Each structure stands twice: as C-alpha cells, then as structure tokens.
Image (cartoon, grey):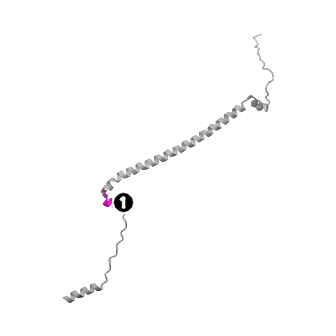
Amino acid sequence: MNRLIADIAEEEAEKEVVPPKPTVQKPESFFSVFLRKGFISTDDATRALPFILYLSFLAMLYIANRHLAEKNLRDIDKYGKEVKELSWDFKSTKAELAFKSTLTEVAKRADTLGVRVSLGPPQKIVVKEEGDK
C-alpha cells in the first residue's frame, strides 16, 4: 500500500504542471452590462419599448417638420427673387411704353404709315340737314 501511494506521488511529480491558460475576457458592451447588471432589467426594457418607439416617432416628425420648414423658406426666397425680377421687368416695360407714347415718337412711327402731324389749326365741320336752312 505504501508502494502504491509512492508510485502515484512519483507519477504526479513526473507530470509537468501546465498552468491553466488565462482566459482573455472581452470587454462587454455598455448596453449589455447596463441591461444585465444595471437598474433596468430586460423585462423593464421590454415594457418601455413602446414608449421608446413613440419618442423615436416624435423625433422623426420633428426632423421632417424641420426639413419642410427649411424647404418652405427656400421656396419663399426663390419666389421673392422672382417677384423682384418681374418687378424690374414691369418697370422697364412701363418706362419704354411711356417713352414710345410721347408725341414725337408717335409722330415718327405714324410717318412711316403716311400719317403726318397737321400744321394748320383744326377746322370745324358743320353738317347741314336738309330741313334746316
């Protein structure tokens, strides 16, 4: 019996003692640690999911509203520039019409048609009716 215990002790001594390989632990993500070890359990997070989705929906509405408002501002700016340009066109056309409707300009244009400005005073035309003598 002593011999058996001695043989076992020798065999164990002959075996090289290999230290266990240290396991490299991956750092856990914040959310997994937060859900497992934090004050919010998985059940609480699942119950809060509709509220989180509601908040996400409101955030998307807010962003869409902001984009729509900016688009409207760009359109207003574009139409304001167009109104200014049309106003300038109107003013230049009005000035051109005022120039072309002056007496000398009308006389020049009418001269090409054969109509001339009368140099004599106007004459009164009297029409006599047959019964009126």
In the image, residue 58 above or below residue 6: above
Using the image as rendered, state which of residue 109 and residue 127 is in the foreground.
109
Q: In which quarter of the image is the N terminus?
A: bottom left
Residue farthest toward the bottom in the current orientation of the protein? 3
Position in image of residue 77 (x %, y %): 56, 42
Secondary structure that dominates the magenta span: helix
Q: Which residue is drawn at 37% across and 52% down?
A: 52
- Type of amino acid at the residue the image marks with label 1: Phe
Rendering coords of residue 3 (x, y %): 21, 89
Reply above or below: 25 against 92.
Answer: below
Region rendered in magenta: 35-39
Q: Is residue 31 magenta?
A: no
Q: Tell me what residue is drawn at x 69 percent, y 33 percent.
A: 97
Relative side of 4 to 84, left or right: left
**At x 65% / y 35%, what residue is drawn?**
91
Left or right relative to 72: residue 56: left
Task: Count every numbered label the image shows and give the total.
Answer: 1
Q: How crowded is mark 1: few (under 14 residues within 10 Å), some or many (20 or more)?
A: few
Indicate left or right for 54 with 90 as reference. left
The answer to which of 70 and 7 lies nearer the viewer is: 7
Q: Which residue is drawn at 37% across and 62% down?
A: 29
Q: Where is residue 15 in the image (x, y as percent from the top left)?
A: 30, 84
| Vertical comparison of 67 with 37: above or below | above
Spot occupied by residue 28 in the image (x, y as percentages of width and height)? 36, 64
Q: Seen from this angle, which residue lies furthest left?
A: 1
Query: Vertically, is 65 above or below 34?
Result: above
For residue 36: magenta?
yes
Residue carrying label 1 = 31
Secondary structure, mark 1, is helix
